[in-house]
Amino acid sequence: MKPFDQPYRFAMKRLPPQYLMACITACCGSGMLLFGYDQGVLGGLLSGGPFQRRFPELTTNSNLRGATVAIYEIGCALGAVFGFFYGDKLGRRNSIMLGMLVLSIGAILQFMSYGLAQMIVGRVVTGLGNGLNTATIPVYQNECSKAHHRGRAVVIEMAVNIFGVMLAYWVDYGLRNNQTEAQWRLPLALQVAFALVTVSTIIFLPESPRWLASRGRIAEARDVIHHLDSTPDEKARAISVDVQMNEILSAIETERKSATSFKTAFTMGTSGQRYIQRVGLGCFSQFAQQISGINLITYYAPVIFQQSIGMSHDTALLLSGLNGCAYFLSALVPIPLIERVGRRKLMIFSAAGQAITMAILAAMTQDVGNKAKGYVAAVMLFVFNFFFSCGFLSIPWLYPAEINPLAVRAQGAGLATMTNWLFTFLVVMITPTATEKIGYKFYIVWACTNAAFVLIIYVFFVETTGQTLEDLDLLFAREQSWFIGPKSARLAKEIRTARNAQRQEALATGVVNLTAHKAGIAGARPLDLEHVEQTSEEKFDTKED
């Protein structure tokens, strides 16, 4: 019996599949809510009187202020690196629980701070935990989800993430008139409460079936897939589980033949896996998210409203809270669209809208004293968040967990998350100085980068909508090209059609073809049963406890 198996087996056997999947999404969402709360909470505290009296050095030195905010991202990047090396060894559930424990320790250090050094250490430790969480949670969600639910589930998670940002803004606003140190200590202490919610939930949830299969725990993986499969007819459900297990084990066997190690992520692979291309796409999606300019707004919205637009402190906090509400509502927009429109189209739409918005924001902030232009600039912050929410909010977190093969999925997600946090650090670090030195010209930089992303996404990004994680392996094996973007939707449709034909045959005949991908898709590999066949010792005890 592995640690925490008892409670998850108890819950898994008593929940219908749709409720079990909803619980997994809710647990992942609570973890991402904490991620959003952490991002939004400090920006509103920086200009508060009690915070400035406790840390006076931050009021006179913009570089130090930027470093104090941004050092959190360095911790997050290091946490993602830890996930790169140890995520597969720990498993998805244990990684999330460890991340929440470390994050809670950091949060305690922060809200108990009596000096800047302690605050900085607390932010680094909090970042370590959050970096591990953000590298693991999307992978866990993806590996537990069906292909047609995967995108929607992660979009919901990221909508909850933005609810966390909004909550942080309103907590800061609600305490703005409190002149005791509770004004800043209480918002920082709330991080621990959110972490406890996630940990107390995940111990009742199953491990990722793909991770279990990759560790040779075949019977357990099959049991989890069985409890997550919502096929109503029991016979059809058993065949559906067999088909899914066949696909997963085929992918594992292909990866095993490639003799993977942590260095594998930086190679093309020996059987058409194209590891470095896929890892690179995941990393670039996170790079693009940060170089869009979003954290210029998320971290410094109150500062922008005050310094760039010329509003009072209270008005700036109020508008930041309203912006958070609008941001959250905008994050709901892609929920019905992500599986219908597709990842690439939504990202291209987002990048184009962000470029236009940043260009207008630059034009409107040239004259800080002009009230009319200031109002337009304030509206542009809301508009930018809308465009960002449509594609760039959730897809960069979904994409690395989808695009990377199982052998390097944890490593690829870790590298992508590390990329996100390193460039978040860059943006958060330079923003106070850049807005002070070059003003409106800073927004022109973001307009140009977003315009470039439109072309890059069109040419290089693969459409993953509707594909199983194993189908994507076939797509890359079939099309050995870097410039795969424009043709990826057609290739994906061909592979999906062949896959569905195989599944229909299995359902009709009651026989699962254990030579994988019978439909003759180029790049398929046969399943070597001697490595994955379940032995009597591996059988999973499913008796009532």
Image (spheres, rainbow, N blue to C red):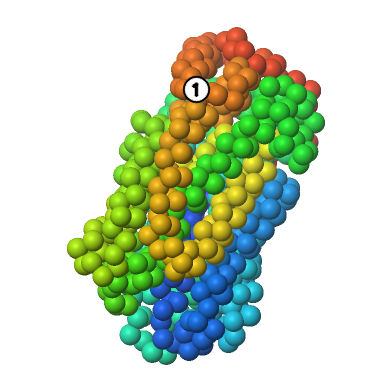
- Left or right, 511 with respect to 21, comes to right
- Left or right, 19 with respect to 309, comes to right
Identify which residue, 172 or 70, lies in the foreground. 70
Place residue 543 in its image quadrant: top right
The vertical placement of 228 against 367, above or below, is: above
The vertical placement of 120 against 38, above or below, is: below
Amino acid beneath label 1: Ser
Q: Position of residue 195 (x, y in %)?
A: 53, 65
- Left or right, 75 with respect to 240, comes to right
Q: Position of residue 229 (x, y in %)?
A: 49, 33
The vertical placement of 28 against 341, above or below, is: below
Question: Residue at (33%, 85%) from the top-left corner?
Answer: 177
The residue singled out by tag 1 in the image is 488
Question: Residue at (75%, 24%) from the top-left corner?
Answer: 270
Q: Secondary structure at mark 1?
A: helix
Q: Does the image show residue 32?
A: yes
Q: Does the image show residue 327?
A: no
Question: Residue at (59%, 85%) from the top-left corner?
Answer: 115
